[in-house]
Image (cartoon, rainbow, N blue to C red):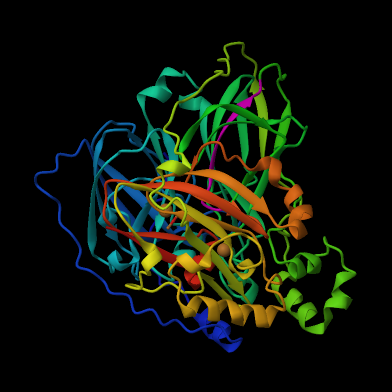
Amino acid sequence: MSYPTDVSRRHFLTYSTLGLLTAVGLPTRTWSGQILPTNQANPNFKPDVEIDLYAQEGTVSILPGAVTRMMQYSAILKTGPHNTLVHLPNSYLGPIIQLQKGQKVRIYFKNKLSEPSIVHWHGLHVPADMDGHPMRAINQGEVYVYEFEVLNRAGFHIYHPHPHEYLGRELYFGLAGGLLVSDQEEKKLGLPSGEYEIPIVIQDRRFDAHNQLVYGTTPHDRMLGTHGDHILINGRPHYELEVASRAYRLRIMNGSNARIYKLAWNDGTPMTVLGVDGGLLEKPETRPYLMLAPGERLDVWADFTGRTKGTELVMRSLSFRGALPKMAEEQMGRGERHGMGRRGMMMGGMGMMMGGGMALPIGSDYPLFTIRVTRETRDSPNLPAYLSRFRRYTINEAANRDNPIPIGISEGFMTMQLNGRPYAYHDVQPYERVPVNTIQVLDIFHAHNMGGGHGVNAGNTGMGSSMSSGMGMMGGMSGGGMMFSMAHPIHLHGQQFEIISRTVDSGETDGYATVKEGLVDSGLKDTVLIMPGEKVRILKPFDDFKGLFMYHCHNIEHEDMGMMREFMVM
Ligand code: C2O
Ligand code: CU
Ligand code: CU
């Protein structure tokens, strides 16, 4: 219980990045958010759990030497089971909020930051006004009251800020926490629990010489997302876990702004996955490695049975390709350098700007954390053969069976959008209006490939001229549109979806081969990694709640840049 409470009120944030970025030709910030009045507790809502949640500035000791100024969530349990809040030792992360399916939850969120914020419960199926929409952001000193019933099945979710254009910075400066839902189906399985169930929140950060966080200082930080050169697990560097020689359940979350990981054990032991974003799979699966993009979660069975005391095991991120535009990968010295000459000066310069100087190159091979066996035991549970049953969707149930909703990833130099449109409040397009209580089919694809043989019927999507002109501009700039193609974790708020197909352009299969065995598509997802040249078809229910629900890239700098849109469920 050494959760840091040392709160300094210094206003440590500077906005100098904005000036710098404008100087290199970034779009200026034009969104004028409408802030709605904050809500009140409903006297007729009888909560099983009541929590006060604060966002505030504070300091944490992370690296040796000076403390690091951060933003932090902290919480106090007012009503509910005593184990509802689990504080992570010496961490800037908010406490893990443990909920049970069916519980009624009221959370008083008080913003003590000197800037607007609002909390989103990533993965939870809650009403639109409980979902942390940017227009609900509250100012310093204000309170937002959340009330919802936990409708989700068991799963590991995230709470994080969602104010427009500040999300990246607030997340990077420390505002995030885990939200663990359990249910009866899961409890019956007897999976490792208590001290044998461990949260693993993976983040990366960059520090200056005074141990202060460095955020968004280069065009690279904005265009490719902000990547750090220190890996932090549960908020700590050089993370080590002491274990007994038995099975553990690792609840892994990628809480990084932009970094994608390829998780594997250093001794070649395969990874056994129990679940993904939306909860347990039907049965365990074994993979040589597992991909984990920002916003995604993995439920991993880690069995140290038979390992002798003193054994050390390292979870690494293995090398892979496709996370970054090709020129940036080349610049980092891992790709085919000979391509630079042919591509010419302009691309070389841009590659340098985008990929140059990265201390922990994206897609390289590096350690994440260490497991040390310190106790031998024989009391390990067995891996269940079957885990869960959940509702499967079929394309025939989709209300728009022959007319998929397009999510076109529009990527260009310093432009990251969806369907050629930036995020804007009250800009819902015809194809973004979804009837409530329907199942919809959606196609997520790289928009510059449209008309290039993907079979997406643009004619029936209701997309207007802005989409085609947006893509025309990119095509013109990029000479075919592939130049800026990179990986994007696309997240949809609300209920989890099912992935029904993936297709990859023939030109991108090499990079794809380095990640494909680690994509677990058999469970329910709320975030899906889309690799360059890839098209992914999903089926998603839009049940129970009307209103605005966001969908966006979970590379948070892309999201802040405008790679976000919203559905109006009606
Ligand atoms: Cu974790 Cu709108 O996202
Ligand atoms: Cu979300
Ligand atoms: Cu993106």
Quadrant containing the N terminus is: top left
User: 157 and 494: which one is in front?
Assistant: 494
Q: For the magenta stretch, what is the residue range? A: 294-304
Q: In this orientation, does residue 483 appear?
A: yes
* Main secondary structure of the magenta stretch: strand
Q: Classify residue 212 by image quadrant.
A: bottom right
Count how many numbered circles sit on residues in the image.
0
Residue 109 left/right relative to 174: left
Report x, y in % for residue 133: 33, 61
Residue 144 left/right relative to 273: left
Report x, y in % for residue 275: 53, 34
**Is 149 placed above or below 468 here?**
above
**Is 195 placed above or below 127 here?**
above
Query: Ligand 1 lies in which image quarter?
Result: bottom left
Report x, y in % for residue 103: 26, 35
Residue 302 left/right relative to 366: left
Q: Residue furthest top?
A: 378
